């Protein structure tokens, strides 16, 4: 999920290549007048319960106001609270808050309280590992995992503790229909490699109540690969999974058919069937360039070896017709009656068949049809919400919030149903220096169950913000 943030001075622009550098670095004083270049049926993205609500305005909430504290710029009328920072002490006494804040989700707790479940994309070189805790640790040598923040109805902290430890490179994931978090490892290291004592590349179920506790047993039937995100079909329990593979051949789009599709917490451990998507005559999704292009007769092929004991899944033999790959398959969410997934970018010089600045695909299970919904850029005088869409969530207004993952200044952008893009937040924490500034990406954007608070992470320095203000519902 992460990309390096080797940034230029704010306000400069240069000729661009997909994913290499920002096409527009917004001015530090407020980032007014943001536009977007895209093609496709943008309204397709705004699905679900919020679709019939207001759109969050045609131009958002106004320009960003510089934060005197130098942490987070927001539109006038909005404010933030820092809920957690890496290196601080966990209130549980288990150790320090770990590094590399990534995917996150918010869940309703008892009364008006809220649970935030937060990933830590820690590898072996992580500055601060997730503390190992008895009963919550998979591999004692793993540095990744999740932490849990329990907030009261006013947004204040009740507790902060370890949710799971001993995993690796916990990037994204997704909420289950029964109120747990599936955290995904974006790695494929085997036991004995890089110092690990157990195989990695799995999905784990993280809970925070006695009814739904965390399990440190990997959900092996869901596959061992470089996982990114998951999304559930609420009608039948099918789980869709994206793979953000680092090298060519790139990742696959999967579906998992659980043996107990509506079993509740722990039911995914009962196993199931893992399949990969084959689009006939389309070996690489980046070769498709026209929005609205649809493919019927999508095939779902059983994965020969879900545990990838000897060969990574994307290299395995799927028989006649092969399998369909896509570079940087990242965000994944369910909306209405379809599942949506994001390809953040594609580059020919890295092995893709075509180049783009971001695709959003929609798969309709009932029609068994895959459609390219939106393509971001390139175009003349292009102004994009970041150079590659990454974390995406539906906002209470019916619009979207998009975390950018690229170089230069880092923002959370809002996207209205009319196609207007507006800045919602800018990270002001410079981890570079005055001559060569650098800002960590945003990740894990999510809203409280009430819709009154936006929670979002800065990857580095790890910071979790709660943003309140005049949200349009």
Image (spheres, grey):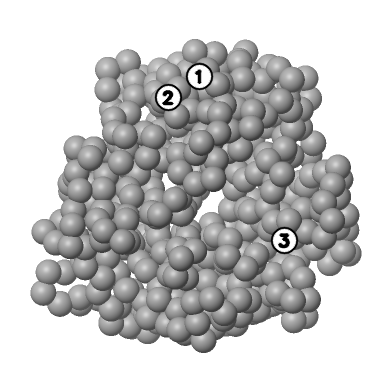
When asked about the image quadrant of residue 424, the answer is top right
Residue that extends furthest to the bottom in the rendered view of this protein: 270
Tag 1–tag 2 contact (CB < 8 Å): yes
Q: Nearer the viewer, mark 2 or mark 3?
A: 2
Return the disc, 2 or 3, that comes first in the chain's sequence: 3
Q: Are marks 2 and 3 in contact (CB under 8 Å)?
A: no
Horizontally, residue 87 falls left or right of residue 374, namely: right
Dot 3 alpha-carbon crowd within 10 angstroms: few under 14, some 14 to 19, many 20 or more = many
Mark carried by residue 147: 3
| Residue located 55% across and 60% down the image | 174
Residue that mark 2 sits on: 418
Q: Is residue 380 left or right of residue 58?
A: left
Q: Residue at x 68, y 41 (%)?
A: 451
Q: Which mark is residue 58?
A: 1
* Percent position of residue 286, x then y: 23, 47
Q: Secondary structure at mark 2?
A: loop
Compared across the picture, whether 231 is left or right of 29 comes to: left
Assign the C terminus to one quadrant of the image.
top right
Q: Secondary structure at mark 3?
A: strand
On screen, 473 above or below 114? above
């Amino acid at each position: 999920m992460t990309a390096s943030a080797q940034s230029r001075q704010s306000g400069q622009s240069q000729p661009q290549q997909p994913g290499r550098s920002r096409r527009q670095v917004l001015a530090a004083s407020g980032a007014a007048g943001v536009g977007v270049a895209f093609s496709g049926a943008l309204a397709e993205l705004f699905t679900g319960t919020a679709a019939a609500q207001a759109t969050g305005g045609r131009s958002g909430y106004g320009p960003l106001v510089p934060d005197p504290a130098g942490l987070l710029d927001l539109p006038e009328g909005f404010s933030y609270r820092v809920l957690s920072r890496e290196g601080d002490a966990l209130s549980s006494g288990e150790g320090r808050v770990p590094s590399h804040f990534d995917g996150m989700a918010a869940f309703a707790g008892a009364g008006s309280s809220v649970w935030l479940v937060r990933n830590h994309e820690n590898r072996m070189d992580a500055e601060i590992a997730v503390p190992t805790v008895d009963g919550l640790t998979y591999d004692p040598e793993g540095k990744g995992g999740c932490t849990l923040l329990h907030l009261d109805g006013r947004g204040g902290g009740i507790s902060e503790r370890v949710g799971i430890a001993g995993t690796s490179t916990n990037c994204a994931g997704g909420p289950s229909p029964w109120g747990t978090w599936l955290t995904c490892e974006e790695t494929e290291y085997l036991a004995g490699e890089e110092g690990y004592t157990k195989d990695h590349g799995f999905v784990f179920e993280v809970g925070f109540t006695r009814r739904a506790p965390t399990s440190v047993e990997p959900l092996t039937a869901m596959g061992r690969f470089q996982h990114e995100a998951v999304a559930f079909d609420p009608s039948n329990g099918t789980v869709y999974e994206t793979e953000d593979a680092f090298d060519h051949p790139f990742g696959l789009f999967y579906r998992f058919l659980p043996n107990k599709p509506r079993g509740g917490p722990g039911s995914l451990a009962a196993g199931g069937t893992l399949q990969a998507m084959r689009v006939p005559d389309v070996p690489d999704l980046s070769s498709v360039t026209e929005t609205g292009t649809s493919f019927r007769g999508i095939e779902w092929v059983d994965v020969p070896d879900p545990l990838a004991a000897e060969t990574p899944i994307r290299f395995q033999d799927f028989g006649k017709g092969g399998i369909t790959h896509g570079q940087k398959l990242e965000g994944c969410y369910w909306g209405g009656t379809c599942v949506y997934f994001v390809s953040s970018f594609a580059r020919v010089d890295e092995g893709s068949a075509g180049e783009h600045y971001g695709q959003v695909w929609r798969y309709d299970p009932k029609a068994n049809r895959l459609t390219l919904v939106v393509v971001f850029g390139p175009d003349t005088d292009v102004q994009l919400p970041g150079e590659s869409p990454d974390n995406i969530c539906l906002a209470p207004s019916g619009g979207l919030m998009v975390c950018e993952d690229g170089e230069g200044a880092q923002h959370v952008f809002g996207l209205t149903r009319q196609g207007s893009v507006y800045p919602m937040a800018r990270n002001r924490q410079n981890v570079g220096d005055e001559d060569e500034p650098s800002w960590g990406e945003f990740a894990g954007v999510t809203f409280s169950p009430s819709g009154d608070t936006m929670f979002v992470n800065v990857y580095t320095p790890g910071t979790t913000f709660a943003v309140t203000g005049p949200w349009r519902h």
